[in-house]
Image (cartoon, rainbow, N blue to C red):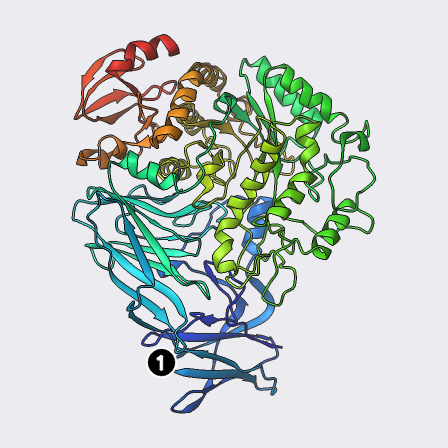
Amino acid sequence: MLNHVPIGIGHPYRYEPDQRIPIYPISGQAWKVRARSDELTKKVFLYVRGELKSEIYELNLLGNARSDDHGPYGQTAKYIGADTHLADAAARSGEYPGELQWEIDLPILLNFEEITYWFESDSKERTTPYSFSALAWAPDENGFLEVTSGFDVNVQCSDIEILRDSTGRIFSLRASLPLTVNDHVVGFGERFNSIDQRGEFVDAVVYEEYKGQGHRTYLPAPFGMVIGSNYGFYVKTSTPTRFDVGVSKSDRLIIEIDIAPGQSECEIKIYGGDYVSILKQYISEFELPKAPPNWIYSIWGSSNEWNTQARVEEEIALSLAHGIDLGVIVLEAWSDESTFAVFRDAVFTPTDGSIGLHSTQITYPRDGAWPNPQKMIDDIHAQGSKCILWQIPVIKDQGEPGSQIRAIWNYAIENNLVIKDSSDQPYRVPGFWFRDGLLPDLTDSKVRKWWGDLHKYLLTEMCIDGFKTDGGEHAWGSDLRYLDGALGIEKNNLFPVAYAQTFHELISSTQSEAITFSRAGFAGSSSYPTFWAGDEDSTWDAYRASIRAGITASASGIFFWGWDIAGFSGDLPSTDLYLRASAMATFCPIMQFHSEFNHHQIPSNDRTPWNIAEQNGSPEVISIFRSFASLRKRLIPYLSVEGKKAIETGRPLMAGLFFDYFDDEEIWKAPYQYMLGTSLLIAPVIQPHTTGMEVYLPEGTWVNLWSDEEFTGKQWIHVDTPVDEIPVFVAIAKSAEMKRVLF
């Protein structure tokens, strides 16, 4: 066996052991090729035929074949986690057991040099020939890039170049924007690594990094704001983009944009004004969201261990017994995990895959996991709570003959409803999660309608309140084929946007008040609230990363955002971490706890306050969490008003201090502080065993929410931090009103 796939499998952050690096070699830069073989192969040779000469090289044996993790500009991000079902699958991804990896570095190429190469083993096995033309950078003489600016903007885009081949096809474009020495750069979607991206390499590629995201993100956006120089920019494209934010040149923000075949132009929009105005201009490029219902601001509870009706009812009873009202119950492990539209163990006659079911067609065995889900949902509603069901945009597998999933699988293929690969065959998910599943092309309106209709009865008949739209990151590869003829390079980033859009269109068609709760997204996702930050371990580092994610997501138009309190995976959080995280979440747009599936091992890994109290031997967790829950309930009217205001004005509900105090350099020393709405300054406790901390109060007069002590701004103050409090300061003009509301 001798294998070489020049473009790899489309993984955005990984080189395979049998691909070309880079996929499109550039003149004047190093390049290499790799091959895979079986373990009987002793030597592999590379034959290269160029314009000037031909060469034969013997490849170097690197050892057992496996993918290697990399990122743009060599940045990496790997999770460190417990032995969970997802951790185990992720650890195995990229392995090629029983195979060897070969590699060789090759001489620098000339401009547009034509190369043909192939491999041959010592057993005379030979690959097909592969050909390419070396690319070269050249000035953008024909004005491929269009830069549009507002009337009040005086920012010049310069250093514009295109990367092309000998035929004139453009592969990439790069340009730069100015940076001054005091500028800070924020945005780029939800970012875990930092709030200020000055001095960082950042890209805009939708990707599921399972924990420890680093520079990778589920929800990127090619949008940023330069705080100091008073401008914002939006690279108006769905193709992958990369940003060198003052690294290579300290006074330049260098943008590199992938260009799709046949693309005739590219646009960068530059916005001026204050930063609220800049953000409003950006989100106005898309449909503005409708204000979500007030119940999103109540407490959300879930666990992947809650996978039976009895367990859900038990946990709800425990919440009531402890005086902690759960306003939203999210059922993740509810479905048969094939159709994602029917409760597990349900009995029904499958349809032909073209239409969804009705409740009257389904029965539920009394000894099944969900003997009466309708009663459970009705009971949840009767106590004033809501019920949301988990989703995944994948046709998981072919299923058994005669099954509903087999009918859906066959219908999707026979009616051309799925994304295709470069061979015009149905694309099969290559990642570790739902591997080999199909992806319905939800960027197509008729496919969205079909997919929505498969789930319609859940809204119209069972009256569930929304969908947790998880896992929108499965589209890999620039050569994928979408139904309208567009390639993956153009649409992969848009897939999660279309996924949320699918359910919003369904919700709108049923005139429901339901919502989506998404993890992945891109530019345009602001139209489809709400969101959460994805998978994290229960560590202090992950907690700080989640706060950074919330502030940056908000600064990119994702206003209705939350995270899993104290993380959802790994060892249980300490009492200290859990209570500090709960305090922060109380003053966050969405407050929710959640935990990963743990095979029902004892003790439980649920992140409920009652389980944390029991497992940690910390009974005080219950009373402290209950006080935060009570405070949260009283905050809902304020959050509702401020959430609507965010949509109207563009000022985020969870706003980094740079929105209001951009000319105060001191705020960058307090990156975890933020404004919740226009009145509350929040300073989360981010270190363990903290009895007191320094808080920065910007310009104005501020009142300590807990002590009523008044302070003049533009100073650092020391604040005591008992575990049942979080430093919160109220703008003095609103202090009396907030005290009445909250106490």
On the question of residue 591 being in view, the answer is yes
Image quadrant in which the C terminus is located = top left
Q: Total marks drawn?
A: 1
User: Which residue: 19% across, 41% down?
Assistant: 228
Q: What type is the residue that disc 1 sits on? A: Leu
Q: Is residue 153 left or right of residue 292?
A: left
On the question of residue 743 being in view, the answer is no
Q: Quadrant of residue 196?
A: top left
Q: Is residue 183 left or right of residue 499?
A: left
User: Which residue: 76% across, 50% down?
Assistant: 406
- Identify which residue, 314 or 552, lies in the foreground: 552
Residue lying at the far front in this picture: please name it.
151
Pinpoint residue 710: horizontal percent, then vertical percent.
21, 14
Q: Secondary structure at mark 1?
A: loop
- Identify which residue, 263 or 597, lies in the foreground: 263
Pinpoint residue 21: horizontal percent, then vertical percent.
43, 70
Establish if 441 lies above or below 190.
below
Q: Is residue 350 left or right of residue 458?
A: right
Within 10 Å of disc 1 (Cα), the crowding (few <14, some 14-19, many 20+) is: many
Image quadrant in which the N terminus is located = bottom right
| Residue picked out by circle 1 | 109
User: Which residue: 54% across, 72% down?
Assistant: 5
Pinpoint residue 129: horizontal percent, then vertical percent.
54, 82
Q: Quadrant of residue 191?
A: top left
